[in-house]
Amino acid sequence: MRIAVYPGTFDPVTNGHLDIVRRASSIFDRIILAISENPRKHPLFSLEERRFLAEEAVQGIENVRVETFEGLLVQYAKQRQATAIIRGLRAVSDFDYEFQMTLLNRKLMPDLETVFLMPSEEYSYVNSTIVKEVAHLGGRFDCFLPTGAAKALAEKIRGMKNPIQ
């Protein structure tokens, strides 16, 4: 069975993320959308909220499941018997970081491949950080997110005293 891990913070999951998941689900037997608690990031949504929103978003994609993980990605992938890591590339600027991470992961676990997928053009500029900024500034953001994530983001922003920080 070809298992791939699609790791990320997913704060929140976007339509671009879902585009990558759909593309990967036609290539691999199983996709694990793996939500991490990245110590360098300060997510708006809790780990459990992000998991719930991602699970809701991937409903109907039969070979995808959502999990959370801590620690080193290659160790997690090995535990899940994954043969590949899925990474989305939106622009050339993504490539430098992803290239370094791929080489590092290859050194740590030579049998684990990294597969880069490009989203559809309509999602090539979408990322969670930009979507949250648009939302904080009062712009329309629901077109970038699955319905559940858009509703959750709207509620989060309404609940914040000073959303622009």
Image: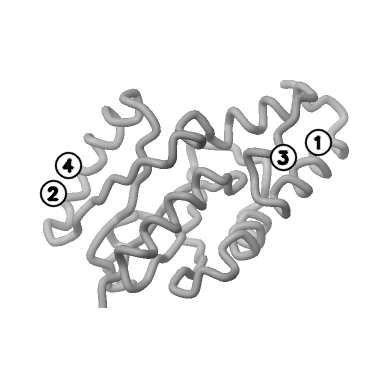
> In this view of the protein, which residue sits in the foreground, 98 or 42?
98
Crowding at dot 1, Cα within 10 Å, few <14 / some 14-19 / many 20+, comes out as some
Q: Is residue 61 above or below residue 124?
A: below
Verify CB contact (< 8 Å) between mark 2 and mark 1.
Answer: no
**Looking at numbered disc 3 in the image, what kind of residue is underneath it?**
Asp
**Looking at numbered disc 2 in the image, what kind of residue is underneath it?**
Lys
Crowding at dot 2, Cα within 10 Å, few <14 / some 14-19 / many 20+, comes out as few
> In this view of the protein, which residue sits in the foreground, 135 or 100?
135
According to the picture, the residue beneath numbered tag 3 turns out to be 142
Label 2 secondary element = helix
The numbered mark, 1 or 4, whose residue comes first in the sequence reads: 4
According to the picture, the residue beneath numbered tag 4 turns out to be 103
Q: In x, y percent, where is residue 31?
A: 39, 66
Q: Quadrant of the C terminus?
A: top right
According to the picture, the residue beneath numbered tag 1 turns out to be 157
Label 1 secondary element = helix
**Looking at numbered disc 4 in the image, what kind of residue is underneath it?**
Leu
CA distance for labels 3 and 2: 40 Å
According to the picture, the residue beneath numbered tag 2 turns out to be 107
Left or right: residue 76 compared with residue 43: left
CA distance for labels 4 and 2: 6 Å
**Looking at numbered disc 1 in the image, what kind of residue is underneath it?**
Ile
Q: How is colour applied across the structure in the image? A: one colour
The numbered mark, 2 or 1, whose residue comes first in the sequence reads: 2
CA distance for labels 1 and 4: 38 Å
CA distance for labels 2 and 1: 41 Å
CA distance for labels 3 and 4: 36 Å
Which residue is rendered at x = 27% and y = 28% of the image?
A: 96
Which residue is rendered at x = 13% and y = 49% of the image?
A: 107
Between tags 1 and 3, which lies in front? Answer: 3
